[in-house]
Image (cartoon, rainbow, N blue to C red):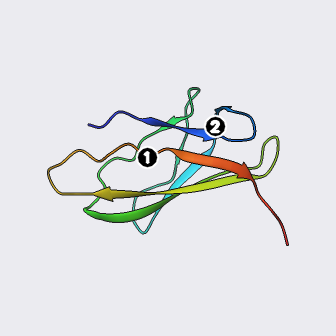
Amino acid sequence: HQPRRPAVARHLAQPARRVKVAAIGAGVPDVMTDEEGKFRFENVNPGSYTVIATSTQPLAREGQGMVKVEAGKESAPVEVQMSIKRTP
């Protein structure tokens, strides 16, 4: 299995702990980052997916990245840079 990579909060320059992460279209449950800001999805079918991290504590933050999953291969780690969410 691939090593987990941190979702880093850009404005804080530290790991984003307890952040919800979703793999859009992957058909797997959302996960939460751990105390080191790392996350991992299990049993993802081959394909390309957008990974979105969101948090509301202490400020609304979000970030996204892309991951490509290939059958029989380890996926490359994904690092998601988070920034303060802008509201219209």
Please tell me whether mark 1 or mark 2 is closer to you in this view.
1
Residue 3 picture location, percent across and down: 35, 33
Q: Secondary structure at mark 1?
A: loop
Residue 29 picture location, percent across and down: 46, 55
Q: Is residue 56 left or right of residue 21?
A: right
The residue shown at (71%, 50%) is 83
The residue shown at (77%, 49%) is 56
Question: Spatial distance from mark 1 to mark 2, Cα to Cα?
Answer: 17 Å
N-terminal of the pair, mark 1 or mark 2, is 2
Residue 26 picture location, percent across and down: 38, 64
Find disc 1 in the rendering and name its residue: 78
The quarter of the displayed image where residue 25 is located: bottom left
The residue shown at (55%, 50%) is 21
Residue 51 drawn above or below residue 20: below
Q: Is residue 53 left or right of residue 39?
A: right
Residue 87 drawn above or below residue 43: below
Three-letter amino acid code of the residue under disc 2: Arg
The count of marks equals 2
Q: Depth check: give the residue in front, 77 or 30.
A: 77
Quadrant in which the C terminus appears: bottom right
Q: Is residue 46 left or right of residue 84?
A: left
* Mark 1: few/some/many CA within 10 Å (<14, 14-19, 20+): many
Find disc 2 in the rendering and name its residue: 18
* Mark 2: few/some/many CA within 10 Å (<14, 14-19, 20+): some
Residue 9 picture location, percent across and down: 67, 40
Residue 25 drawn above or below residue 15: below
